[in-house]
Amino acid sequence: MAASSGSDNVSEGSWPKWAIALAIGAPVAVGVAGAIYYTRKKSKVSERKDPDGKPSETKASDPAPEQTQPVLSLAEQAQAHKNKGNKYFKGGKYDSAIQCYTEAIAICPDDNAKDLSTFFQNRAAAHEQLKNYSEVIEDCTVALELNKQYTKALFRRAKAYEKIGEKMKCLEDVTATCILEGFQNQNSMLLADKVLKDMGKEKAKKKYETRVPTMPSKQFIKSYFSSFSQDITCQPLETVKESKEDTEQESDSDKEEATEGDEDKDKDESEEITKSGYVKAKQSFDKGEYEDIINECTKEIEGDGKYAAHALLMRATFYMLEGQATLGRPDLDKLIDMEDADKKLRVNALIKRGSMHMQQGNSTDALSDFATAVRLDPENSDIYHHRGQLNVLLDRVDEALRDFEKCVSINPTFALAQAQHCYAMYRSAFAQRSPMQLQAAMNAFEKVIKDFPECSEGFALFAQALNDQQQYDKADEMFLTAVKLEPENPTTYVHRGLLMLQWKQDVDAAVTLMKKALEIDNKCDFAYETLGTIEVQRGNLEHAIQLFERAIDLARTEMEMAHLYSLLDAAIAQSRVAATYNIRPPMQ
């Protein structure tokens, strides 16, 4: 039988465990006239009462009453009032329950702190049923002053704070509850998770609107573009200069018939191309100089230049990389609607807009854009590669597998897609708990790193799968190979640090690797986030807060910010709880 939701020591009934009442509140002085006596009558003699309900006086002709019980102490009288209040509570008579609990509070000796705290939390429970949330908070606060680690009072006050919109106070109380309960109570964990997500979304929305755009590191940009095999931005400038109308080759006879005027025209066009904003942007891109790309693309677009479509794609891409999706979206929309534009440009724009939708939590529109891209160019391997990644995020592993299989069938030399295909195979086998499929996935990884020995991503993904399988020695070997192939990639150091934690519980080694990642790329938000999480586990909450704040400043999407704010607020709450209650989560 479940414990009552109304109060401590209430008889068991149908109330769910998560609603167990906590009694807390401001005492209300109630005068109690006289002492309470209990008498027992003989079995067949009925009790006589006056019209007002009081027992009548004994007459000489009445049988002699049995010996009167001793007078109850004030503490016992208070318990009697509480028990009576519990019965009212169970019957749904919350006002009457409140009155009884108030009477119990009024007569309970001050040195009975534990009983008093129970009476206050029971009264808070009745107030909660009446939605008197301010009174709930007041009573819970008094209960906690009497019993500092009273988890029922903490949790009930947390719920009341949430109801009135005091989310941070709610989070502090529910965090203390979770720690005191050893993170074993599902209901308090769910409330903490809900409040963290709500706060994260609210803060991220506000921050994203006022954030200062930041260009990510060169390594990040390089990794981003490596995920495309057919992005025109990455193609040689000579290829870019061929417009859609120029793709047909001139015949030898046509060239022989070229007039002097035509030659002058070609010369003028050549000079015009040299001055093109897009061409300058492309030259900067090839040199790894990204700061002026958006401005140069804007010149091409506003001047309605020959490569305006190319410029729209490049500008939108760099707006996205800077975290300015709202500015990049119109460029993608315009390019997608340009039916005379190069098909590869439009498909690339659809892929990027689909990814943008996904980053904003809109998977329906994301999948719609990928479906449109397939109809437009069904043999473009990039579509299936990126949709496969999206399906992995959506935990649609079977769909991801089909996409990666299609991608590598179209473009078997695309090493990154081959590696991610193996990882999707591994995820599918792991989900199905199939040893045979698991072994097949690991064999596929072995083949990929043999066929593409220069693909660091293949070694890194294989290492993550090996780590899951607790094959730590081999996982570390794969990570070290990935570092050797791409020493400037900070994420590999972060993943290897996580391996050190899981394998050897070597926190110092993990922290050293995280710091190495930040030395390589001080804009790696993944490293700041992971290091912040480790510092929380070590109890270094102030340092963790600083790391999360830095990661938030570098985040490129509102969704990323919301996640990071959740981590930040959790660390802040733990810091305050530690100061208030002198409790911390167990170190890991």
Image (tube, rainbow, N blue to C red):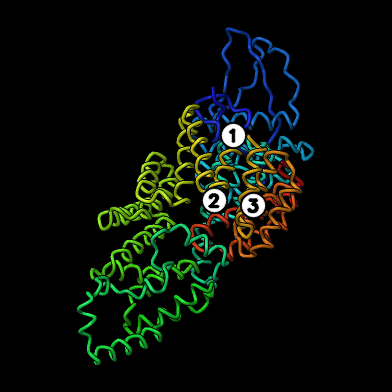
Q: CA distance from mark 3 to mark 2?
A: 14 Å
Work out whether residue 3 or residue 424 is closer to the camera in this orientation and state it: 424
Q: CA distance from mark 1 to mark 3?
A: 19 Å
Image spot of residue 292 (x, y percent): 50, 79
Residue drawn at point x = 59 percent, y = 38 percent: 466
Badge 2 marks a residue whose secondary structure is: helix
Question: Disc 1 designates what residue?
Answer: 469
- Category of crowding for the residue at label 3, using alpha-carbon neighbours closer than 10 angstroms: few (below 14), some (14–19), many (at least 20): many
Q: Which mark is residue 494?
A: 3
Res 121 quadrant in image: top right
Work out whether residue 228 or residue 433 is closer to the camera in this orientation and state it: 228
- Asked if one can make out residue 332 in the rendered structure from this viewpoint, the answer is yes
Badge 1 marks a residue whose secondary structure is: loop
- Category of crowding for the residue at label 1, using alpha-carbon neighbours closer than 10 angstroms: few (below 14), some (14–19), many (at least 20): few
- Category of crowding for the residue at label 2, using alpha-carbon neighbours closer than 10 angstroms: few (below 14), some (14–19), many (at least 20): many
Label located before the other in sequence (2 or 1):
2
Question: Disc 2 designates what residue?
Answer: 457
Image spot of residue 284 (x, y percent): 49, 77
Residue drawn at point x = 37 percent, y = 68 percent: 329
